[in-house]
Image: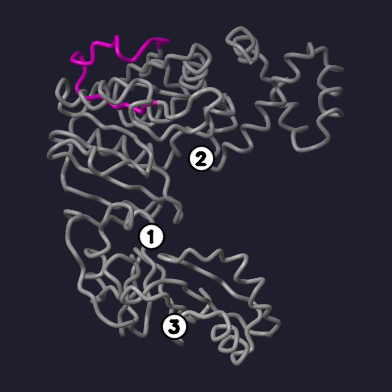
Amino acid sequence: MDVELLAELRNQDELLAAAGNLAGGDPLTAATALRSRGAPPDLAAAALTQATLRRSARAKFGAAADRMFFTRAGLEQATRSVVAERRAARLAAAGVRTLADLGCGLGSDALACARAGIQVYAVDADPLTAAVARANAAALGLADRVEVTCADATTVEVERYDAVFADPARRKAGRGRVFDPASFSPPWDFVAGLAARVPRTVLKLSPGIDHGLLPPRAEGEWVSVGGDLVEAAFWCGPLATAPRRAALLPAGHELTGDGTTNGPVGPVGRFLYDPDPAVVRAHLVAEFAATVGGHLADPDIAYVYSDDPVETPFARRLEVLEVLPFSLKRLRSALRARDVGRLEIRKRGSALEPDKLRRDLKLSGRSAAGVVLTRVANAPTALITTHS
């Protein structure tokens, strides 16, 4: 799809509705049905693509997806609405009224901010992506609050706005995902310098971003949705309210701390707590351990142990049934003694591949159990646990 085809597609409500009814069936049959309505082949194909993308987008955007427009790459990279809405609410609560959105993509964050009452100037360097963001603002009735321009983010006079939100592109054509910040677009030097120009700056980044890149006195936040780690955000200047934060959505549970505390170390307890990935990536395992009266069994492994079954939103809790120095033969014997046939395998600090281990164990029992492959006092260890 190009900008011209998108412009034509925006005026084809009936065609898009028909494509929505046909999506999910045989593509050739669907395309033939749309062409029988008089749609040119390229327009019919574009409508079917949009119908398919809209179905996929419901997981991120809910019912609003059925009125929006997408590209495949743009949908993959778009902020989930639950994340964007939380960020927009936080910006609005901090008094932000105007925002420059640099690298707006399909417009997820710009739309959320507009719904929160913020006037947004959004830019994207790709003409089609900018056109899609503009179409989405119009489709959702937010065109008066979101101005979208195709432009190089580095040319924007960001000082004109209360705050800046930047989501640098982390993919390059033919190269896939880019991990080196120097290869971001716009480049990291520009992105990292935004807070010096506009103190209220938020940077959306990959969850694997190096903590060492966090600007001085900024807040590093790691966000998970339904247990999946989805992004990191650096909140700068007066927007920073804690050194590190783990946010668990959609429930909205938050854990904060300085991210530098070393948790206490002790023996394996009756219960193992497997912290949410946002807690782990934010380096808040020690802070989490304190909430359940727990400790680590190895200072470098992010499993927490306790003898008490504390209810917590920040981790999955498993009861430890048996602790074994790892050996395949010993583990197989212990599991067969428990008549285990269905096995859930977790690992942290182990090089073993769960699928290969499952095949090697050759279990055929009637019960279910869990195995945690880890290290205890730096020794390879297998924990037999309850099935989560």
Which mark identifies residue 276?
1
Q: Are marks 3 and 2 in contact (CB under 8 Å)?
A: no
The amino acid at mark 2 is Lys
Q: Residue at x 38, y 18 (%)?
A: 146
272 vs 331, nearest the viewer: 331
Q: Residue at x 69, y 23 (%)?
A: 16
99 vs 167, nearest the viewer: 167
Q: Position of residue 344 (x, y in %)?
A: 56, 72
Front: mark 1 or 2: 1
Front: mark 1 or 3: 3
Q: CA distance from mark 1 to mark 3?
A: 26 Å
What residue did someone put label 2 on?
A: 60
The amino acid at mark 3 is Pro
What residue did someone put label 3 on?
A: 325
The amino acid at mark 1 is Asp
**Magenta residue span:** 149-168
In the rendered image, residue 166 lying in the magenta stretch gets the answer: yes
